[in-house]
Amino acid sequence: MPPILAQSPAVLRIILILAIAAGAHVLVRLVRRLGRKVMVSRASSSYSKVRTVTSLSISIVVFAMYFVAVGLVLKEFGISLTAYFASATIIGLAVGFGSQGLVQDVVNGLTVVFSDLFDVGDMVEIAGQTGIVQQIGIRFTVLTNFMGAEVFIPNRTITNVVKYERGYVRALADITFPPDPASAGRVEELVGKIVESISEQFPGILITTPSIKGRQQTSSGKKFLRVKFRIWPGQGGPLEASFKREVVESLKSIDSAYSDWMVVLSYEVEKKPVSLPGTSKHSTELKH
């Protein structure tokens, strides 16, 4: 113990110990707040790791600081530090057995951070929840879903993770043209209006504005109009129901025999571009 504390009355020493602990805690909180402001705009994996590890380290330091401060205060009342540490160890084991969920949260959180399973800004599906990762914490991983709501997922529930590397699912609507070639222009006009209407009705499911890719033709000679949507994962319902129904009903005004099977919806998950050995600087995009 420093000489200035050893020479002071017991009450004064207790006050000084508590004051030092409280001052250090305030300093730690200021450092933590400053660190968050510096890193809040950074989404790189290195910064998310630093943020998570720093949060854990600060929590441990604050706990240790108060733990030692309480021990020094009790010492002034004649309680042995050896007995204090021994009893604290036993209590800690008891609390640990009763807080297995908390321990699992911490272990899983660190595993996610250091294994690069996913990172801040990624579109993922975890424990049945789909959203963009906003924060990877020691206890919770925070997502923002397609409605803009924050979803807090306990780290211990992270078992299976689906990662959408492009941040969306691509939905393709292939609309077969009626037999009459002269109706093609009218079909494009009607579909354009329906796409615009769907964009206004269901803006939450769309990542970007839909695009009409124009007239397409298969190797067998079948002609169709392709519409490309980029949507949130699992949000294809409005396309399957409203969009497809409106297209079929509208095109029946052109061809009364127009049927549901003539409008086909398919979904793809695009992968990020990768550089293959022997290729140019521009990457090749793989799709599946």
Image (cartoon, rainbow, N blue to C red):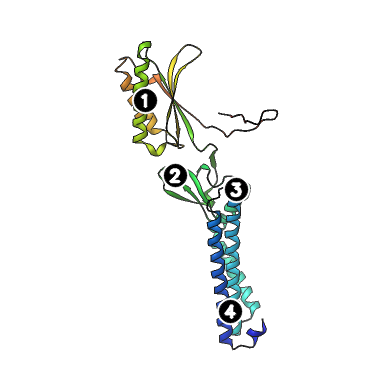
User: Residue 254: where, in percent of width, then height?
Assistant: 31, 16
**Circle nearer the N terminus (2, 3):** 3
User: Residue 244: where, in percent of width, then height?
Assistant: 37, 26
**Dot label at residue 145:** 2
**Dot label at residue 17:** 4
Q: What element does badge 2 sit on?
A: loop
Q: CB atoms at circles 4 and 3 under 8 Å apart?
A: no
Looking at the rendered image, the disc whose residue lies closer to the viewer, 1 or 4, is 1
| Label 2 to label 3: alpha-carbon separation | 21 Å
Looking at the rendered image, the disc whose residue lies closer to the viewer, 2 or 3, is 3
Q: CB atoms at circles 3 and 1 under 8 Å apart?
A: no
Q: Quadrant of the N terminus?
A: bottom right
Relative to 69, 171 lies left or right: left
Q: Which residue is mark 1?
A: 192
**Dot label at residue 254:** none
Mark 2 neighbour class, 10 Å CA radius: few under 14, some 14 to 19, many 20 or more: some
Q: CB atoms at circles 1 and 4 under 8 Å apart?
A: no
| Label 2 to label 4: alpha-carbon separation | 47 Å
User: Residue 48: where, in percent of width, then height?
Assistant: 58, 51
Q: What element does badge 1 sit on?
A: helix
**Dot label at residue 45:** 3
Q: Amino acid at mark 3?
A: Ser
Q: Is residue 114 above or below residue 75?
A: above
Q: Amino acid at mark 2?
A: Asn
Q: Amino acid at mark 1?
A: Gly
| Label 2 to label 1: alpha-carbon separation | 28 Å
State which quadrant residue 287 falls in. Answer: top right
